[in-house]
Image (cartoon, grey):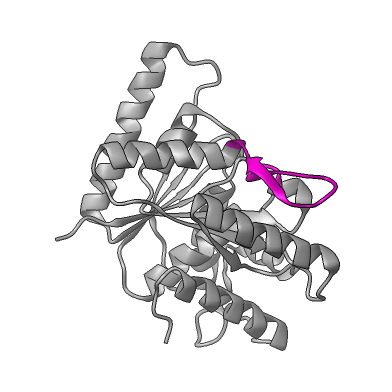
Amino acid sequence: MPAGKVIVIGNEKGGTGKSTLAMHLIVWFLCQGKRVASIDLDGRQGTLTHYIENRAAYAEKHGLALGLPEHLTVSTREFPTEAERKEDEVAFLYQVEKLKNENDVILIDTAGSDSALFRLAHTTADVLMTPINDSLVDLDVLAQIDAESLTVKAPGHYAQTVWQARQKRAAQKRPQTKWFVVRNRTMHVSTRNEKVIWKLLEALGKRINFTPLAGLGERIIFRELFLKGLTLLDFGGGKAPLKLTANTLAARQELRNILRAIGEKTD
C-alpha cells in the first residue's frame, strides 16, 4: 500500500482561515472514502482540534454519522532545550510516518508562528497550501513590496522558510513540494486592491514557484459552522439538518475549484 499524501496548511500569520480550509479538506477526503488523519500543530490555540471535537459532539447529540479523522494534537514547548527540541522533532516525524502508513491523506494544520516543528512540518509536505487574507499586510510574509511601484522586491520570511524546506527535501531526494497560495476571505465585489494583490501573487509565484488560487470568500456562515463542527459538505442529503442556499452553493463551488486546482477530481 502506498504511503499517504501529506498536505500541510501553513502560514506564519494567523487569522487567514487555515483551520477552516483544513477541516473542509478533511471532510471532503472522508466523503471520498479515504482514510484521513489530521495533526493540529497549534496545541495552545487548538482551533482544528476544537473544530473536530465540536463535530463529534454535534454528531452524537443529533444521532448523525459524520465522518471524523484520526486526530493528533501537538503542543510545542515554549522554551525547549536543544535536547528537548530534537526529542520533539524525532517524535513528530515518527508520528507522521506512522500516520502515512495507516492513512491515505494526512492534513497538518500549523500554528501561525515560526517554530522548529513548524519548519519541520513543511519538509513533510507533498502539498503545501498557504491561505492569506486579501490584503497587502498578509502578503508581507510572502514578499517585500515596493511601496511606490507596488512590485515585488524580494521574497518574504515565510517564502524563505518554504524554500529551505524544499532544499531539505531535494537533499533527501524526495519530490518537490507542490505549493499553492490561497486567497481566502475575499470580498464578493472586485476592487483595485484585489487586482493589485492578484498581480503581485502571479509575479511572485513565477519567481519562487507557487500557484496562486482563489480561495473561500468572506462569509459569516463559516463561523457558525465551526461551533457545530460542520462544513459546507454537510448540507443536504440527510447529513445534517441544514438547508442549502445560494450562498452555501456558491461557497461549495469555491471549495470545488480549490480541490480541482490541487489535482483532485470533484465530479
In magenta stretch: residue 148: yes
Residue depicted at x 69% and y 63%: 199
Residue depicted at x 47% and y 65%: 25
Camera-side residue of 51 and 190: 190
Q: How many marks?
A: 0
Residue depicted at x 32% and y 41%: 169
Camera-side residue of 171 and 186: 171
Instruction: Specify the quadrant of the image occupied by residue 204.
Output: bottom right
Please state the horizontal and vertical placement of residue 245, each as a whole percent of the image. 69, 87
Please state the horizontal and vertical placement of residue 51, each as a whole percent of the image. 56, 55
* Residue 137 placement, left or right of 76: right
* Residue 157 placement, left or right of 139: left
231 up-or-down from 178: above or below: below
- Magenta residues, start to end: 140-157
* Residue 40 placement, left or right of 245: left
Query: Which residue is the extreme one toward the front?
Result: 149
Give the quarter of the figure containing the C terminus: bottom left
Camera-side residue of 59 and 89: 89
Please state the horizontal and vertical placement of residue 32, each as a whole percent of the image. 36, 76
Query: Which residue is the extreme one toward the left?
Result: 1
In magenta stretch: residue 152: yes
96 up-or-down from 119: above or below: below
Instruction: Specify the quadrant of the image occupied by residue 68.
Output: bottom left
**Residue 200 seen in the current view:** yes
Give the quarter of the figure containing the N terminus: bottom left
84 up-or-down from 226: above or below: above
